[in-house]
Image (cartoon, coloured by chain):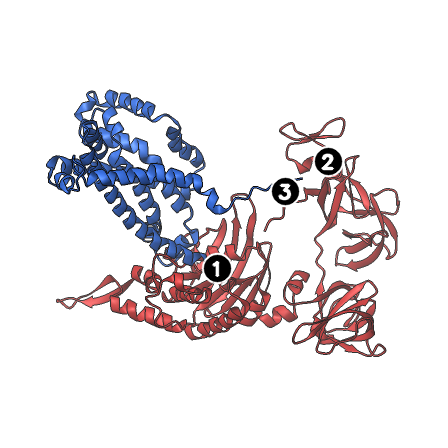
Amino acid sequence: MTDFKISFSRKQLCIPYAVFLILFVIAPLVVIVYYAFTNGQGQFSFANFTNFFTSTNALGTLLYSFALAAVTSLVCLVIAYPTAYILARSGFKRKYVLLMLFILPMWINFTLRITALKEILSVLEGNISAYPFLNSVIGMTYDFLPFMILPLYTSLLKLDNSLLEAASDLGANKLTVFLRVTLPLSVPGIISGITMVLLPSMTNYVVLDMLYNSTYIMGSLIGSYFSAYDWHGGSMISLVLLVIILIVTLITNRFSDKDTAGNRGTML
Amino acid sequence: MNTNENIIELIDVKKVFDDETIAVDCFNLQIKKGEFVTFLGPSGCGKTTTLRMIAGFELPTSGKILLNGEDISRLPPNKRPVNTVFQKYALFPHLNVYENIAFGLRLKKTEHTYVNGEGNSYKKKERLSKTEIDKKVKKALEIVDLDGFEKRSVATLSGGQQQRIAIARAIVNEPEILLLDEPLGALDLKMRKEMQIELKKMHKKLGITFIYVTHDQEEALTMSDKIVVINDGDIQQIGTPTEIYNEPVNTFVADFIGESNIFNGAVVGKLKVKFCGATFDCLDDYEINQLVDVVVRPEDIKICNPDEGQLKGKVVSSVFKGVHYEITVERGKFEIIIQSTVTAPVGNTIGLRIEPDGIHLMEKVYTVNKYHGEITKNNTVKFGDGEFECDLTQLYGGSHLDEEGYLITSQGEKIDLTGVEVDVEIDTHDITMSDDTEAGGAQGNIISMIYKGDHYRYIVRTEENEEDYVLSCPDLWNTGDLVSLIIPKEKIKLCLKPTGEND
């Protein structure tokens, strides 16, 4: 008998992921950085950088994308917070049905959903191309709402009821309890919800295309550069977007770090 | 203010939860200003629910809670001048120590009287100023011995420190009553002992009423002016620690507070009681022939030479417990626990002495007979060494029996009840005796009869397992008579044994 043993060390187990990471994450990043800082002749240059920040067109798109994403996040938050609150904190009997209703659209194909939404909006508005910004916000909200509800739901669910009782015991009425305890303690949920809605809605141009909004957002701007074979300009915009996302993530991480430290304290 | 005044009064307070469990039943209690009152009972007895009703987190189903004579039972928690120290502290994790303590102060409005230009005085409600809040927070931190902790995050504090902050946060509001819900439960033994002493000191210094909830009898005895012993939503006994310990009113209290030996006894003469096969002098005066529960604390039993003692027994174990030995002595079928500073070798026969003041008698209370029963295949129920016909359909509302003897529930489900265990209850008035030994479901001898003014109370004991039936009967029988017991089918109350343990 041969003593055959397959021995895996942990290092070997991460090979598939490492290969994936190098091929599809690191390599494209290197390519983007390379294109962003070179010109057509392959020489190092800041021209793409200065081009982007001097072009009113590009900056306008950045602003428009950001405005669209911010309004979408806000609308999502306004709809999602009360919903998540009811789902997590009330004795409402049909709450799982309600949760299901919000999750269910995620199981339906994205294009189909937006097409259906387009039909509904045409009935309501008549000529839907008359309200491009509004329609885009509605489309994005429809698409990203579950991503806002879920983190809020989780953070409100784990909120310790005795904290609310303590606040009320110390003289706070229902509104004060909400403003001074519930709301601050659900900030991590709000932040992760916003991160999950704000960033994708800056680039998701398919929604705009399908709802006849011809204004460029970051996603479509990059696309337009690439389809005009301007790899250098497109790469620079991608890089700028990447840096913006990085900054937003760093800021939000700082917030949630602070909070987890606090939560750990109550667990002890 | 008059120190004899009741600060809080609970009148017939009852709490029934949504699932129809009765948490608190007919609670009547008066607490005087400045008292340290402890609610003591096993978990799930309703003590925390009562505290939560005083705090305002739960509304009583019926009854009144009077604070200084005013009914507050419907007020929300923020309108009540009471503050709570929670079991798991419930400190706000997003606020530092200072902000936690100042939370209540920032919401507080006090009334100030001013005089305006024309000399008229007027009143204005104002929030506390920053310096006032600063001063109060600092003082509260001094009281709990954590001066200088203002800027610390609550997450960096140890369990004991968090507990102190929780206390500071409550007392800083100068409540009329401080409610403490098992506040020391999460601390280790040494810390708990320290905090017990400190809480007691704080109570003296602040002079406010403390209502303290615990399941730890030692904690209750150490700290309280008054203990309220609660079981199954009912008050068992209210008294000072000494009263509760030395004169428990029933076997539950005796068993729950401290260690105790509880025996079945009978009064055999003026101040004489018989238990464990020997007769003792005692101080409690009961009628002759009265059946009693006898409580003897382990430390009240003295060890002596076998021929000098009132009882003789064999030592089966001796365990060193620090201050004393815990010795278990066997005498016939009885087991007696003794706490003594001297030990006795295992296996030796020793004598035991109990002084009259070490014996406490409690009248046995019989209102219902309770048995454990099992349903037979003939749809009768076996209990108390007998077999009785019963109405099984009461186990499931709206059910009936089919021709084959299966139970059909209201939903049409068929249930075979053979072998199912049930709790059986029979009122003392519903049992009758017959001298035809075949007439009833069980047979036994009358072992006791007590004349109760208009009727006799008999106790009939069966031979096999010595099960007792307690019954009232106006006719005169003789002790020792062999009788059979007749119980009408519809008077036997059955109840399915709970399947799962609930807390």
Q: Nearer the viewer, mark 1 or mark 2?
A: 1
Q: Which disc number belongs to residue B87?
A: 1
Residue A115 vertical position relative to residue B130 in the rendered view, above or below: above
Q: Which disc number belongs to residue B247?
A: none
According to the picture, the residue beneath numbered tag 2 turns out to be B417
Q: Give how far apart the Cα atoms at labels 2 and 3 are.
A: 60 Å
For label 2, the SS is loop
Chain A's shade in the image?
blue
Residue sitting farthest toward the front = A2
- Mark 1 or mark 2: which comes first in sequence? 1
Q: Give how far apart the Cα atoms at labels 3 and 1 are.
A: 59 Å
Mark 2 is on which residue type? Leu
Mark 3 is on which residue type? Asp
Please state the chain letter of the residue tagged with numbered disc 3 in the rendered image.
A
**Residue plotted at (19% across, 35% down):** A232
For label 1, the SS is loop
For label 3, the SS is loop
Question: Quarter of the image containing the N terminus of chain A?
Answer: top right
> Can residue A198 be seen in the rendering of this structure?
no
Which quarter of the picture shows residue A21? Answer: top left
Residue A219 left/right relative to B57: left
Q: Nearer the viewer, mark 2 or mark 3?
A: 3
**Badge 3 local density, few (<14 within 10 Å), some, or many (20+)?**
few
According to the picture, the residue beneath numbered tag 3 turns out to be A3
- Residue A23, image x, y percentages: 35, 37
Which quarter of the picture shows residue B360? Answer: bottom right
